[in-house]
Structures are given as structure tokens and as C-alpha cells.
Image (spheres, grey):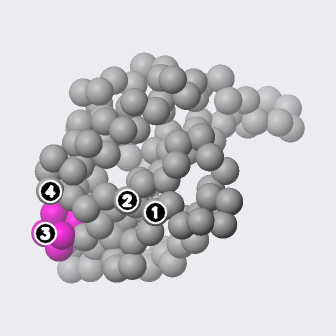
Amino acid sequence: MTVEGRVVGAIAEPGLLVLIGVTHDDTSARAERLAAKLWGLRILAGERSCSDEGAPLLVISQFTLYGDTRKGRRPSWTAAAPGPVAEPLVEAVVTALRSLGARVETGEFGARMEVSLVNDGPVTLIIDV
């Protein structure tokens, strides 16, 4: 993942790319539950988890996950928490993952990031805890 041409986060082996959207009622307790779920989720080869394999996670804040397209032709972002609310909660997920023993790379909060992905599967899940 790059910001203005410089690499800010990358994983070079099989692991998880995690896009995190934060909404208004999210809490630090919910962030900790999400971290535990991500660390133990058995979706890698052989039904193994990141915790089983020591696989890395690349965590990126993604407010656009809460884009509402039900009305009109332009998404509404009102369900996404503002930066001052969202940033500490994304950091709480990263901190909780690291406390579980995870190797975590991150994006740069609020930056325009270019993300490259090789998706083995493909498998994309929405995880709501």
C-alpha cells in the first residue's frame, strides 16, 4: 500500500487484508472483539487462522464501507464516524491484534492510499461483531 508513491504498509506472505469501517456506535470493546475474531478466523489454507499460522494482517481504515447508495446517484457518508472518532478505534483494533501476538502492518489514516491485492480465492467477508 502506498501513499504519494511511498510504501506505508505491506505484507509479503499469505495473510489478511482488513478494511475497517467505523460507524457512530462503535466502541473500544467492539474493536477488541473484532481483533479476536480476525486473529482466530479459520479462513486460510487448510481451515487455519492467522493465529495458527502466524500470518500477518494489513489493516486499513476505510470509511467508504459505510457509503449509503440507496438514494440518488451520490453516496452518503453520514453512517461513517468522523476521523476523530474513527482513528482511535482503528488504532484500538491494531493494538488489540498486536497484544494477541499478531504481526500487523497499517495504512496511513486519512491519506489517499493505493492498495494492491492478490486475492487467493477470492474470498471477501463482512465481519460485524
Magenta highlight on residue 90: no
The answer to whether the residues at label 2 and label 1 have Cβ atoms under 8 Å apart is yes
Magenta highlight on residue 50: yes
* Residue at position x 83%, y 36% in the image: 74
Say if 104 sits above or below 126 in the image.
below
Residue type beneath disc 1? Gly
Q: Earlier in the sequence, mark 1 or mark 3?
A: 1
* Residue at position x 62%, y 58% in the image: 3
Where's the N terminus, which quadrant?
Answer: bottom right
CA gap between label 3 and label 4 equals: 11 Å
For the question of whether residue 6 can be seen, the reply is yes
Dot 4: within a 10 Å radius of its alpha carbon, few (fewer than 14), some, or many (20 or more) residues?
some
The secondary structure making up most of the magenta span is helix
Dot 2: within a 10 Å radius of its alpha carbon, few (fewer than 14), some, or many (20 or more) residues?
some
Image location (x, y in percent) of residue 90:
40, 38
Residue type beneath disc 2? Glu
Residue type beneath disc 4? Gly
Q: Nearer the viewer, residue 63 or 112?
A: 112
The range drawn in magenta is 49-54
- In the figure, is residue 116 to the left or right of 69? left
Quarter of image, res 115: bottom right
Mark 2 highlights which residue?
A: 105
Mark 1 highlights which residue?
A: 9
* Residue at position x 34%, y 77% in the image: 14
* Mark number, residue 52: 3
Under circle 4, the secondary element is loop
Mark 4 highlights which residue?
A: 101
Say if 37 sits above or below 80 in the image.
below
Image location (x, y in percent) of residue 58:
40, 60
Q: Earlier in the sequence, mark 2 or mark 1?
A: 1
